[in-house]
Each structure stands twice: as structure tokens, then as C-alpha cells.
Image (spheres, coloured by chain):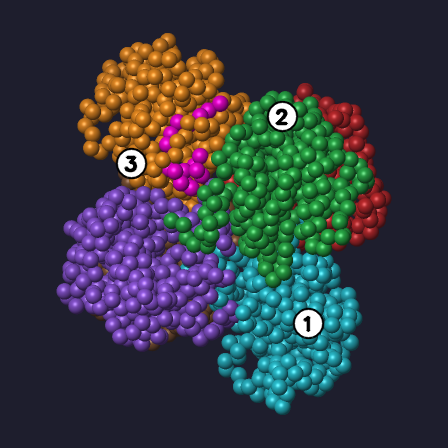
Chain colours: A brown, B red, C orange, D cyan, E purple, F green
């Protein structure tokens, strides 16, 4: 089973010891991105994975490729051209102080400036069984959008499973109308099997109506996501619900045609929140491949996400045994 | 609006990763002090600020000046002479283990050995609207005490706002009688507009009586601080109340002639406690300048202090927008 | 009063910032071991301590000796031969994610390959009043086992106090039968005065029966440990009970002939759990030497263990004053 | 005497310990740029300096401003807009292995996208006596070029000294014709007093002919640079000549109307070469302001450049006393 | 063209800043080994490479695999079993102070304890065109020796090129007779095409006689190595000659049936000497594959080795363009 | 053979990577001092050593004690009182850029404020055979001077060898007359056996006349030092001569009653120069104890000093075998 992801690779720069940028002469350097994160997690679960992207043709691009190989991701479909890579600073939050992300330019990146013809989509699809497409590709540039559309179409036509992640970033869409944005998503969804997102993606982006006659927000989510699954004939629509009352917690949901399943609510102890949604998506993909029942699937996925909050960096690194040990309540102790 | 602070600049050396001094061959180096901290915060709120101090005339003194400029503080009134700077080690606490401060010599510092004639007080006052004086200057040496008195007098006479912080450190006063100490504070208070302190400063240092007929400690504080405000015709007496039951929390108060205002009690998640009182003072000064009502003022100030517990280093670095977002309950999430 | 410990010195390699091994090009290096940890704590309580062990005859062994001297432990009975030292990686856990220990080879270490004749036990015993023996020596190799037996026998015969720690690691005993393992412990226990362990050491290793007619697990522990103390005529059997419901907590117990004493249950805030049991043992030894009543002893020991959870590294470093201040509720504040 | 510099501020990311990017998870972070470097040096020589530039309106831009203030440079003419800053990685060379610079996007930076109307040139010029303009501004974008032209014109008209640095980077001019490039330089040179460059700037960019009838390369440089100085009525044309035979060495030259002066050839011991040309320029500007004779000027400037090769980072940090002590042969010893 | 290497992967721990082990609480961590180093270099020259080895089945082994993938080496033939990996400390030398290597146990490593049946040699050979075998495998244990013999035999029989590196470490052969050692090498050499070594390998290990009738050491080397090449029908015998008179230098040689070729003597500037012989071997393999003449080959190989002295870590990382630029004298400057 | 040293322990703070103080937020921390350095070296040569000093009674003082124990120095005569320790910053030089030392206050240190009665000199002397006294103690304060005098007297009277080091720092003697300073040295020299110094100590401090009738500076040194040795009946007067022509070099000399011996001139490769004179002194003491002839002694001592230039930190760490291997020309290679 081979899993392909199409998307941007970014550089992340993180001041140490919860410092702000202005306090440090020294930052941690890593490479990340939705696709990288999902494949990192799947590779730690034992799957063969491969990244489809464009990296800059310089020392930075090559270092990025080394970093993703180190995570267990193949780079056979990585191409080198251009000379820029999107990057962001993460000032890690502590307690009630939120983490703060500062993006530097990602539009002019090698990936952002890539176009359909820069990718050998046919070969990439032919060599994969599951294809993940990050919604950011849809919004970043005309080139990445066309590549995403074509990839989804090709994958769907050849019977591969397509996993799509809304990953909607308003900051990348300041100049587009709501209608235009919606149309892009409408254009790709018919090719998809798994969609990762939240209720706001359905109601605010896709204009599904909230059934206000239903009382609880979970009932509303169940109803709307069932509508969404039916309309696009999805295998799963899945996402997480975050709560913050006394202590922060998270809960996973997955909607299939037959069922709306919810994980246990899980208390969060947050060290590094970035990439935890990707850990969840990787869990969902795993469950789909391994044909688990929805309840097992949603709990495994949320456990993977909970653990991802406790590790440094965007890319989830927990192996299957670690997630399963956590599922069985084996927590907080020393493992020797 | 330009704000001047008079006080000591110190060096802080911090072992990394919550280590003790004996565990590390490597320490974090920063420059700090009550005045530096308050001005750092005010500069992040958008004010023009300037430090009035003496630094050693060597590579350490010049590095200190660079560090305070980096925080947004002007150094036009910094003078270089002598060759020593007070310094302290901070062994950062974790959970229930307290942080531990180890001071090395601060009496023989360039600042500690400075005298009235080393400062051009007249120009400094003429260029400022608000002047902050740290109580440590009053206790450190005859020279810094005379400079503090003269500065307060000049500022008061020329209609500038004077903010004074008790900042009483028993370790600096081992050889002085209670009466002598009290007299020093009595000598400066008539020139002050804002005073930062706690109930113990009033009752133990200034010999105000606790009205034991009042039951609650807050009622007692309200009463005593009203007395204090009246006696010295202060605009504000302000401070914080720390509580530790199950989880540590903090609450701000401000007393003006008309009113005793209390902030919400705020739960604390503590990463680095040092300098948080200075964050509170900076909030109070901001509110005074911007003529906020007491309730808004005390809540903004305490929010600034709460956030200062979550950042590394003594000097508060949160911008106004960050404090306001926190006030609005926008916490713990990732800001993109 | 001089305290000797016999056991292995290991190297610990710790990725920084809660990273996993695969995420870092840089690890923290320290030297540790049950004996080192207990003596480190005792030396911080003011006792003269000395380590009896074999270190590799190379730069690593000499650095290890420097490290233990730095902790306040004498190295007059350290001998250098061979060229390997056991080592382990610690991936520090965060929140609910457990810490993970990865051992590299410790059997082929200079200590593991040592034999009885490598030690001058007679001199070491003659120069000490209390002798600590780590149970790992009993399980590691024939050589270390014979040395441990002989050391215990000699110490007992010459009227020295013997403290023994079960420290049972199943991973070191994959090839030995239960009976064989039990016999080794039975062979050393008659020489012992203090034994550190838990109920599972008594019931699973030593085959004591759980009195199921008693309801609570604490009642059962009290009963079984009394039986154990009587059978081997121990001064103390002592250990800790860990609980994890909403928040993790710990409780110490000590059983003597007259009494089963329990500490208060103490909430844990865990930064680095390794070595905390050794902190507890050091507290028990201190109480024995200073002839405290059981209640004072068990509370001091558990406080030392609680604080050890909040400091970096295996070796406890809190001085007596710090543990006592903590006992008196002086927590979480800044000490100046 | 106040000196203004107009130009780009960039971020520099440097792997530690001479590592390549792919070898590290941790990079040194600093802020740099021709203007920043020259002003840093001038500020360490005692001058008041100020940077005229645009920084991104985010945490990175604000940290950059703090960094330049820390160097002693005023930021009163810094404006914040946009959200990107040019950055580069420096893989530091060792011995015969060259350093390698990898630029990420600088065209889309806040500075690169700035236009004439973003700057209050009139005020900036009015407040300065010497104005430095970096040639990169001329080549980066239409906006920065127009601002550079206007600034030079304004400064010249109001009798301020204009210092211009060719700083020609072919990589920024892939799409422009030679003629077009030459015209840009021709347009700014009439406003200039000091020009920093090398013989190739004159012969390859400005199409001066090499007088092949003169034998030595130094004679040719003297001749051509005299021509250049006359044509544009410059006070100085100055630059460095690098040689590498057995050991690398450097020599400074300065051409004025009367004289072609050469420094001693100076042996180089290279730790960090970037920014050393800017150290040289700062020395020339200092000599011009202080009206030194050419020989003193060129030797001081080259000494500053030689020392800049031995310090970390782009921005020269040697104080006047340090350069002078070096001039007097006080080298390689410990200064206490 | 796919290149396979069989050999040990080790962990290297390096104190920073030229410190000794006893001076640091922090070490650099990397993974290395002759095979890893040669493949790293070949992968940076554009070849597909793959490592045939056994890694421990734990977090350390998996991190090692990630590290070699990051270098561009495939891990499809890596198997995980056992729990130990050989490791060494490198105290980096400076100037005339030599670097010092301290090995911890490598015999008990997963690789050292592996045997013939742990490897799927047939598949590995079938998928490769060039196979490198490190002489350390021959000396480490019976298991690795048998695997090395079988691999060489299989490769030779199926017409693959076999490259063998003496890599003789006396410390691994304390208990074997000279005759026994010689026999092992004699057993593998008939299968080899390229052998890497020095004159002492031929004269001291293989008992070739030094032709004392020839005067110069180079003439002697040429003569003996021709004898060696003829006897074992090698394509190449290659190695380096180190000289240290005033400045250290190195020279490469390669002996084929027709020719004894010598590179230019190259001055060395040494930052990290470990692995430089492997850089040389990678150059030789490259030349063999690309059928260069001996002179080009030996110069390219020695240039790669010279550059490897200037980079951190054992594994050579210079790309082909960098080596070629160096060959063309493009040294010591900044590459932008 | 037990060696005692009396003197100050200081803290050294060193910016990493040759940075200046203003460039770093992070400094290396170590503990040093002439006595510490000499004993560190002697302990690495196999001698029992012990430090006689006063450390601050706080976390810094205790960490300092741990650090010196780690170097192999006993702390049985260390006493804790006061709360300050002298400290200095070292900005490490590179190439021709000199290292720069910035002292912060050392007069107010626990050692500087100590007096005769704080030391149990009788016991310390009784337990030692060789006593080293640093000249800084003579100049620091009245208290340390009296202690130094008494210690020298006691040692001399009881037949112990006294080693004295001029270590003259003009910065500590700004207010004393030449006559006064000379008298202090005259008062201690009659008790001394070994004196470490240079020709300027004899001619400028002690007013010995330079025999200008002798031509070479070495002849002059030989003559003057013979005079000095005779006058004070010294066993040795020893020191180093530094030269800097093309490359820096060093040469050791030792003068005894019979002989003036010179080492070979040794080329220096300087990484960290501080403490190298102490390495030389340790070599002289070793030779005296082991009764070497002057030529062997002076060469061993200078080799130890040369190696000390190549290691990080003030305290020499080379073992006897390493110095001897260096003597035998075994340089620059990798030792495995």
C-alpha cells in the first residue's frame, strides 16, 4: 500500500525555550507541510509513502528533501526548480498564551510558482493507491490549483482513493470572492473519497445550512456532515472538535454514509499544537486502509492527534505501538 | 508621550531547560531591571521610552545598552563609567519547585557607586512626561538615593507624573533600622503620583495599621490603601494579590481617591515569574496616560502581568494587541 | 558518617526540548545510576559519600568520574578497566505521553564484566558506615552478583548498615527462571537493614501472598510488608505508591517492626521522572541515620522524591534546606 | 554628524560549527544588509546613524528593528508594511572550502515591493549629513530604484554627502540588458561624492577601457579610477583588492582627484567574510568626515575590513580603539 | 547505476567547540560508518545508493535509518534486530593537538552479532551494480566475516564490481595471529575489483616485500602496488599518502594494471578528519563507473578528500559541482 | 605527594563561536583561576591536589566547588562565606584579532573580602608537600595578602616547597606606589622555592637592572634571572618567552642555580590562550617533584603550555600520556 501526498513543503523556524523571535539569536529549523505531516505519520505506521512536490533547486531544497526522507517519505516524485520556499516562524505559546505563526512569503515559492506541466502526475498516480491533496494547493496559485484538480481527476478515474483536506487559510484568499472560493472546492470534491474538515468548512465555505431546529452543536454537525457525505458520495468526512472550558480537550468525529461516530473527549496537554490535525487525518487514512469500524478508527485517529500535541514539531512521529499503548491507557509512565 | 525610568540595569544568567547552575556549562544571558522591564512593556505598547542609568564603561555595559535599545528603549541618558554591573542567576522553578535567585554583588556596580552629579537630571526630566523611580535605588547606596530624591523632586516641581515602586528587598537593608528605611520612603512619597506596592509595604514598612475590625483581607487592603492614597494625595496605589490554593492565581487592585477596583482573579500558568510585577506597573501607567476607568485599567494591567508569566525573561514583550486579544478571551489557540 | 554505594554508572543521553532521538543532532550528556543518584542526594544533605564501581579506562570513564565528583561523591574506590559503559537514551515525555528509555548494551560494560577480585571490598567497607547495594548488580552478571553478595556479607558482619534496592528490571532477566531470581534475592536479604521496593517485589518476586481478606490495597501492603520486615529482621522496608486519577500523585510508605507509616499523598508535577525513587531512598537513609520517627522520615523522603520530579536529570540535587522549605509549604514562589 | 543609509534589511540564517544546512536542526539568526553593516560600523566609531528602509509589519520585522537598534542604529525612518523579508543561508566555509550563500526570495520583500511614496525622503535627508545608498536598491525593483534616485537627488541638492556602493549582483539582473544596467548607474553617479566599487564595476559595468598600455593591474586601476573620479567629480572612489597566493591577503585603495593611495597589503585570517566590504566603506566614510589624509584613511579602512573577517556576522562591531590598536600592531594577544 | 555498501553503522558523539568530553554537558549526535560515508558521497554525486546492514530494533536504530536516508541512502536492505549499536566519542583536535577517538563497545552491536542468515544477500546483489565491503566487517565477528565473504563471492560471480577497503584496526584484532588476519584478507581479495588501502596494508598485513633497492617511498609504493594489482587482477588499488612537514598535505595514488597515477600534493586545512578516506574511495568509485582516465580520477578523488577535511562530520557531503569548482581553483571565496 | 594551591576562584563567561558579548544571548560558563588551573593540570598528571580558597555561600559557590572537584581537585579546605565571586567575560579572539577580557568586580568577592582568620592554614600546610601561591592574592586585598604571607611563612618553616607566581595585573594596583608593590613581593620571595614570572617582573617590579652590556635579550634574561635566583636562593625561576613574527611561537626557560635552560621554540596554534602560563607552571612543578633535569623539565612544561593553547577553557586538561606523545612528535593525527 503506497500513499502519495501533493502539497507544499515549508520551512519552520522556532525560537527555543518558548522565546519570542526578538529574544533569540538562534532558531530551530525543520521542514513541514500538511502532506509531509500526514505522510510522516503514515510512514511511522508502517506504510510506504511518497511526496509529490517542487522544491527549490538549491541547498535549502536539498536539505528539505533530506529531512522528508529522514521522516520515512520517498522523494522520487520531488522535482527541483526555482529558488524559494515558503517559511514561517513559530513563537510557541505557553499555557494561556497562544502560539503565534508569522508567515514569510509563500506565493513566490518554487511550489507556489509551479504549474501543471512541472509534475508527472500520471506516473505518480500509477504508483500509488491513496492520494492526499491539501486544500492549500487549491488556494495558493493558479498553477498549484490546476495541478491539484488534474491529480484528483486522474486518481479518481484510475480508481485510487482520494483524500482531501480543506485546510482553508483566509490569509491566502484576501482577494477572492466567496463564490469563487466555493467553486474551487466544488470542483474537486466530486473526485474525493475522504474529506478532512470542520463544520465551518461546510457552512461558511460550502454554504450548507445549519439545522437550527437541532439543539446541540454535535447534533448539528452530525446532520450537516451526513448531508455533505451524501452529496459528494464520500467514504468519510472527518475532523475534530476542540473545547476549552477548564482544561482544553479535543474530540474526533467521522461521518460515513451509515454512521456518525464520535471519539471519547480527550484532555489535551499541549506542547506543540501545529500539525495535530494532520495526525488526525493520518489516523483516518489508516483506518480506511485497514477497514476498521468507525469507532475504532475515530479513537485511533484522535489518540494520534492527542499525542501529536505533546511532541515537538509539526510532523507526527508516534509509531503504531505508541498510539495503541496510549489507547490502552498506558500513559504518563516511563517506558523502559 | 515620553516615559523615563531611573534605576539599575542588571545582568541575568539563566541555566537552560530548568537546570540548576551546577548542571550546566551554558547559561542564557539577558539584561534586566525594574526600569528596563517597565519601559520594555511601555515601548511594546507604543510609547517612547528612555532609561536613566549608569552602565559600566566596558564591553558588558555596551552590550547592556544594545539590549535595552533592542527592547525599544532609548539610551540617550545612559552614561558609562566604572566597570561592574549587578548580576543574578535564575534557576527556573518547575511546578511546585520555586525559582531561585542568587545575586552576586550589586553594591559595587557602576550604578550602585553612582552619585547625584553623575546624572543630568534636569535635561532628563525636561524631556519626559512620566518618570518611574524604582525603590531599589532608594535602598542601594547613598548616591542612588540622593539621585532618586532629587529626580522625584524635580519631576514633581515641573509637573511631571512620578511613578514609584516600593520594590523592597530586605537583603539590601540588613544594616538599616526600620525607622531609617521608613523615613526614606516618607521622603519620596510626597512627590509621587502612582505608587506600586502591596499591603505589606504599607503595614510593615510604612506602619499603617491593619483595620482588624474588617474581616476580609481584601476589605483591609481597600481600607489601608485608601488611607495611603489620601495621605500622599496619590492618583493611584496599585498592586497584585497572589493566591495559591489548588492552582495559583493572581488579582490586580488599584486604589484611587474615589475607588478601590479589583480585577478578575486570573489563573496563572507560570513559565518565568520574574518581572511580572513590572508588567502590571506598565499596565497601570498606560491606563493613567490613556485616562481609562479604573476597571479597564486594572484588568488590562493584570492581563499584561498574567501574560508576562508565560514568556521567557524579565522584560515584558507583549504588544497592546496581544494583551487586548487575551482580554477578549482569545487564548491558547494558534494565531496565524 | 560515610555512605558507600555499590553499583553501575551509566551514561544518559537526552534529546533537548522534549524531542525524540530522530529529531535532534544534539543530546544532553550526563552520568547516572542508582548508586550515583542516592549518593548525590545524600551528599546534598551534607553526608560524606563514596562510589564503589568500575569505570572504563578511557576518556569516557574519566569524564564519568569527574561528573560524580562534581555531585559531591568521592571516587577513591573507583577503578578503571575495560572500555565500555552502559548507556541509555531518554526521550522525555510530556503530559500524557510517557518518557521512553532506550538502553544500549550494558552487559559488556566495564562494570558488567567486573568480578569479585576487581574490588577491594574490605577497605571500602571499613571506611563506611552505611552501604547501599543496587539490585541491578545482582541481576547484571555473575561477577557483579558475587561482588554484591560478598559486599553485603562483609558489611553485615562488621556491623555496618546495609541498604538494598530491588530495582528489578525484567529486561535484564529474560533467560533466568523465577526460582533462580528469587534465590538471588533470598541470598542477599538476610544481610540487609533497609530494603527499598514495592508490593510487587514482595508478591511477584518473593512469592509473598496477598492477603485478599484485607480490602484495601494499602491494608494489603501494610500486612505484606510487615511480614517481609519480620522475616528478614529489617529496620525498614520502604517505597512509594503512584496514583494517577485526574492528576498524578505519589505517596511514600515505610514499614518497620512497630509501624506502617504513610506520607501525605503528594500531587506530582513531572518534568523528569527518572531517579525519583532514588531520591526517596536517600530520604529514608537520611532518616535512619538521624533517627527520625517514621512519620517525619516518610514525609521528608517523599518530599525529596516529589522535588526530584521537577528537576532535570536522574541525580537528585535538592539541599536539605530546600526539601525542608518545601515541607513547610513554601512552594512555587521565587526565592531570593 | 548623522549618517543615513537607504537599503534592504535581510535575515541571515547560519548553521553552527561550519555545518551545512542539511546537517543541522538549528541555525543562528541575525539581521543584516549593506546599510545595516555600514551604519553598525559607524555607530561603533561614535557616529549617530539611522536606517531608511521598509520592514515587514509582523514579529519578524519588529525583531529586525530591535536588532538594528541593538547595533546602535536609529529606526525613526523605518516603516512597517507588507509581510516578507529577504533572507539567505550562509554555509560558512573553512580553509579552502568557500562559504556558500543561498538566497531565498528577496524581490517580494517589504523593501523590494516598496515605492517612492512609502518614504519620507525629505525629512530623512534634512536630518542627515551623509547619506549612503546601496546599489542593490537600484537593481532590486522599480520602486526601490525610484526611491534611490530621488534620495540621491534630494541629498545632492541640499548639499549632503552621498556615498554610493555599486554592490552589483548579477543574480538580481538576469533579465536586464547591459545598456539598461549601465544607464541606471549613470543616472545616480552625478549625485554622488563617494563611490565604493572595484575595477570590474568601472570596466565591465560602466564600460571604461582598461589602459592595456599600462603594465601592472594596480597601475591600470589607478588610471581608470582617476578617470572615473574626474568624470563624476567624486571626492573618493574606493575599494579593495583581494589576492590569494600562498595566504589570502587584501589591500585597500582610494582615489581622489589628487591622489591614488594604497594601503599596506594585509594578511587575512578569515572567520566570516560577509560584510567586510561594508567595514571598508565605513572606514572610508569616517576618514572623509574627519578629513584624514588619504594614506591614513585607506589604512584605517583596510584595518577595519581585516578585523571584520575575524568576527562573526555581517555587521562590523569593532570600536575605533580596537581598530587603532590593531593599526599599531597590537595583535593576537590577550587584552585585559 | 546502483551502489550497495555492506558494513557497520555507528553513532558518533562529538563535544562542541573543540571541547573534551569532561568539559561538556552536551554532544553532537550523528550516524556514520565507512559504508555510510562512501554512499553519502556517491549519493551527493548523483548515484542511487543503498545500505546493507543490521540496525538495533529500537528508537536509536530507527533514528539511524532516518539519518542515512537523509544523506540520500536507501534503507530497503536494512534489517532491525538486537538492541545495541557501536558508538564512539570524537574529541576534535585543534592545530597540533590530535583528535581523539574513544570507542565504546561495538562487538555486541546488532551488526556485530549478525550472521549470514540475517541478510538477503541474493536480492541485494541482484539490485546493485557496485558493491562496497568494509574490511571492518571481516574483523568484527565470525558472523559479519561470513556475510562479507559470501557477499563478495556472490557479487563477483554475478559480474558485479566489488570494492573492498582494508580499513584495518589493530584494536579489533588483539587476539588474532598475523597469519589468521592475513588469511582473511587473502580469502576476499580474489573477488575484488577495487581495493582501498595503503602501503602498510600490503607490506605489514599481506607480507609484500618492500623493494629496498628502490630509493623513494613513492617508487616503492608504485612497485608494490603494481605487484598487488597483478596478483589479484584488480582494476585499481588506490589510497592516499599523508605528509606533514611545515603544513600538512595529502596526495592520492591509484594503481591499475597499466599505470601508477599520483594526484597533485594538496595542502590540508583540517576541521574534521574522520571519513576523509571514505571521500577518497567514493571519488575512485565514481571515476571507475564513469571510466575516467587515471589522472582525472585520482585528482577528483583527492579533491573530494581534501574538501571532506573542511566539513563537519564523517560523511562527505560535497556535490559534484562543488568538487569540480574546487578542482578548477575556485577556492576560499564566497559563492553566491 | 599532595599539592595545595591558595588563590581566587573566578567565573568565566564565554560567548560561543568567537562572538562578542553583544552578539549572543547565551554564554559558556566555567570556573577558573590560577590555582585551579595549575591543580587541574597536576591532577591530570596523577597528583593529589587541593584548593585553599573561600567561595560564596550560595548556589554559585557550590557549583564552583563541584566544577573544581570535577577537575580532580579536592575541596576539603574550601570554606563558604559571603555572596560574590569575581567573574570575567572572554571574547575569544580569532587570528590577528586579540581575545578581550572584561572583568566585573573581583574586589568584593568572597575571596577578596576574606582575611587571615578565615583559613585554617596550619592544617592545610600540614597536609601538603607543595604549596602554590598566586601573586594576585598579594595584590587583591589586605586580607588575602596577609593570608598569603602567613601561608608562605608557615610552609617554608615546615619545610614544604613554595611555588609563587608573580601574575602581576596592573589593573589591580592602580592606587599603590611602585615601592609599596615591590615591598610586598620582597616580603614573600624569601619563603619561595619556585617562582614563575618573566623578565619584566624582575626589571620593572623588582628593579633588577638589565645588563645592557649583553647583546641578546635571552642573554640578558639568563643573567638577570641568575641574579634573582641567587638573591632569593630559589630552586627555579621559570617562565615563557612569546614571539610573533610570521607565526606566533613560544619558548620556555628555567633558571636554577647551576643552569639556564631553554626549550625548543614551539609554533603556536591558538584556540584559547587563557591559562597557558598555568599549564607551564604545572609542568615546572611536576619536573621539580620528579627531579627531572632542567632540559627535560623545560620541554615538558612548554609542551603542556603549547597544548593548553589548543583546548577550550582556562584549566589545562591534558594527561601525562598526551603531553608525552606530543613531545615525541605524535601530532595532528587521529588517535584511536
- Image mark for residue D263: 1
Asked if residue C61 lies in the magenta stretch, the reply is yes
Q: Are marks 1 and 2 on the same chain?
A: no
Give B45 or F22, whichever is nearer the viewer. F22
Between the residue at mark 3 and the residue at mark 1, the CA separation in whole angstroms equals 67 Å
User: Whole-percent x and y of residue D329?
Assistant: 69, 60
Give C109 or B60, whichever is nearer the viewer. C109
Picture mark count: 3
Between the residue at mark 1 and the residue at mark 2, the CA separation in whole angstroms equals 61 Å
User: Whole-percent x and y of residue C123?
Assistant: 40, 20
User: Whole-percent x and y of residue C101?
Assistant: 34, 39
User: Which is closer to the viewer, label 2 or label 3?
Assistant: 2
Q: Are marks 2 and 3 on the same chain?
A: no
Q: Are marks 3 and 1 on the same chain?
A: no
- Image mark for residue F159: 2
Position of residue C158 relative to residue C90, above or below, is above
Q: Quadrant of residue F301?
A: top right
Q: Which residue position is annotated with label 3?
A: C107
Q: Residues within 10 Å of mark 1 (few under 14, many from 20)?
A: many
Q: Residues within 10 Å of mark 2 (few under 14, many from 20)?
A: few
Q: Secondary structure at mark 1?
A: loop
User: Which is closer to the viewer, label 3 or label 1?
Assistant: 1
Residue closest to the far bottom:
D213
Q: State which region is magenta.
A: C48-65
| Side of C4 where F182 appears, left or right | right
Question: Pointer 1 and pointer 2: residues touching (CB < 8 Å)?
Answer: no
Residue at the (47%, 74%) spot, across then down? E329
Q: Secondary structure at mark 2?
A: loop
Quarter of the image that includes the N terminus of chain E: bottom left
Residue at the (61%, 46%) spot, across then down? F261
Between the residue at mark 2 and the residue at mark 3, the CA separation in whole angstroms equals 51 Å
Residue at the (64%, 84%) spot, across then down? D220
Amino acid at each position: 500500500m503506497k500513499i502519495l501526498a501533493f502539497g507544499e513543503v515549508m520551512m519552520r523556524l522556532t525560537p527555543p525555550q518558548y522565546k519570542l523571535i526578538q529574544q533569540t539569536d538562534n532558531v530551530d529549523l525543520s521542514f513541514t507541510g500538511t502532506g509531509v505531516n500526514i505522510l510522516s505519520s503514515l510512514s511511522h505506521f508502517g506504510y510506504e509513502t511518497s511526496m509529490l512536490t517542487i522544491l527549490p533547486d538549491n541547498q535549502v531544497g536539498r536539505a528539505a528533501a533530506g529531512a522528508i526522507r529522514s521522516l520515512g517519505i520517498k522523494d522520487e516524485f520531488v522535482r527541483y526548480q526555482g529558488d524559494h520556499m515558503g517559511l514561517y516562524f513559530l513563537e510557541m505559546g505557553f499555557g494561556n498564551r497562544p502560539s503565534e505563526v508569522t508567515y514569510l512569503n509563500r506565493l513566490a515559492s518554487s511550489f507556489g510558482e509551479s504549474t501543471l506541466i512541472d509534475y508527472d502526475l500520471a506516473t505518480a498516480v500509477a504508483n500509488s493507491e491513496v492520494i492526499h491533496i491539501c486544500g492549500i494547493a487549491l488556494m495558493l496559485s493558479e498553477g498549484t490549483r490546476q495541478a491539484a484538480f488534474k491529480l484528483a481527476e486522474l486518481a479518481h478515474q484510475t480508481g485510487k482513493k482520494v483524500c482531501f483536506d480543506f485546510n482553508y487559510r483566509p490569509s491566502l484568499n484576501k482577494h477572492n470572492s466567496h463564490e469563487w472560493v466555493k467553486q474551487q472546492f466544488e470542483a474537486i470534491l466530486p473526485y474525493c473519497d475522504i474529506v478532512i474538515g470542520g463544520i465551518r468548512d461546510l457552512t461558511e465555505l460550502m454554504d450548507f445550512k445549519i439545522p437550527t431546529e437541532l439543539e446541540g452543536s454535535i447534533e448539528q454537525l452530525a446532520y450537516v456532515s451526513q448531508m455533505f457525505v451524501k452529496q459528494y458520495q464520500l467514504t468519510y468526512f472527518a475532523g475534530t472538535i476542540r473545547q476549552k472550558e477548564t482544561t482544553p480537550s479535543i474530540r474526533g468525529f467521522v461521518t460515513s454514509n451509515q454512521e456518525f461516530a464520535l471519539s471519547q473527549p480527550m484532555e489535551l496537554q499541549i506542547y506543540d499544537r501545529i500539525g495535530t490535525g494532520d495526525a488526525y487525518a493520518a489516523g483516518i487514512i489508516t483506518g480506511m486502509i485497514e477497514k476498521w469500524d468507525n469507532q475504532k478508527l475515530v479513537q485511533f485517529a484522535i489518540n494520534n492527534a492527542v499525542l501529536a500535541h505533546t511532541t515537538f514539531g509539526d510532523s507526527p512521529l508516534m509509531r503504531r505501538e505508541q498510539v495503541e499503548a496510549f489507547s490502552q491507557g498506558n500513559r504518563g509512565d516511563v517506558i523502559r
